[in-house]
Image (spheres, rainbow, N blue to C red):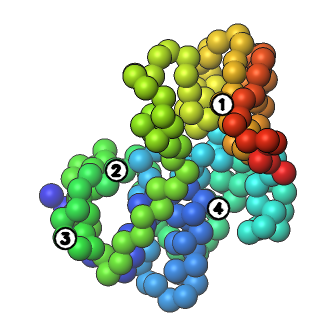
Amino acid sequence: MKRSRIDVLIVGGGPSGLAAAIALRSRGALSVRVVERESQAGGVPRHSFHHGYGLLDLHQLLSGPAYARKYGLLAGKSGVEVSTSTTATEWCGDTALALTSGQGLEEVQARAVVLATGARERGRSARGVPGTRPAGIYTTGALQQAVYLHRQPVGTRAVIVGAEHVSFSAVMTLAHAGVKSVAMVTPEPAHASY
């Protein structure tokens, strides 16, 4: 097993993990490494093709993929090492993690570890939907991956549960896939998006 030592190890290569890595490098951390289990860094925005990203942090209005690319470029320019197709599999100590990738197994000892696993939708038990997930029920992230990354068919008609900003993102993804959204349901008196 390969062993290495660095200042900061960040688990998660989405916008939060990349932004944290960039900030740490700008504040003097010498060796900052981001590990991302997907084949590309950038997180959920990579396959969220609508605009609305970057206004607050980058002062630009960008699509999701453009936003993800911008953070990847900024991380590279700041000297952050980004390891894609790499999964953190277990803790080996207070600030040490075992990683696995196509290059094999590695144990990384860091002075600090940042968990930036971010935009994961709530699991089935947290949503209160009993039983196993039947075919055709997607979280927004899984829907976007199926449509934009894998070009998979996802049905012809849909009901969206929830009326938050991410729910409207699901409607846009479904429209892109040629799926008719027939209803959006929420227990709230109004939608919660801007």
Spatial CA distance of label 2 from label 3 is 17 Å
**Image quadrant assignment for residue 31:** bottom left
Q: Nearer the viewer's eye, disc 1 or disc 4?
A: 1
The residue drawn where x is 23% and y is 73% is 94
How much space separates mark 3 and mark 4, taking CA atoms? 30 Å
Find the residue positioned furthest to the bottom. 28
| Kind of residue at disc 3 | Gly
Q: Secondary structure at mark 4?
A: helix
Of residues 53 and 2, which is closer to you in this image?
53
Q: Earlier in the sequence, mark 3 or mark 4?
A: 4
- x%, y% of residue 57? 74, 69
Q: Residue at x 15, y 58 (%)?
A: 1
Q: Is residue 157 left or right of residue 90?
A: right
Q: Which residue is mark 3?
A: 93
Q: Earlier in the sequence, mark 1 or mark 4?
A: 4
Q: Residues within 10 Å of mark 1 (few under 14, many from 20)?
A: some
Residue 71: give its label: 4
Examine the rendering and report whether any part of residue 145 can be seen. no
Mark 2 lies on residue: 87
Give above or below for 65 relative to 70.
above
Looking at the picture, which amino acid does disc 4 mark? Tyr
Which of the 4 image quarters holds residue 33? Answer: bottom left
Q: How many residues crowd around disc 3 within 10 Å: few (fewer than 14), some, or many (20 or more)?
A: few
Dot 3 and dot 1 residues touching (CB under 8 Å): no
165 sits to left or right of 60: left
Mark-to-mark CA distance, 2 and 4: 20 Å
Residue 122 coordinates in the image, percent (x, y) = 50, 43
* Distance from the alpha carbon under mark 1 to that under mark 4: 31 Å
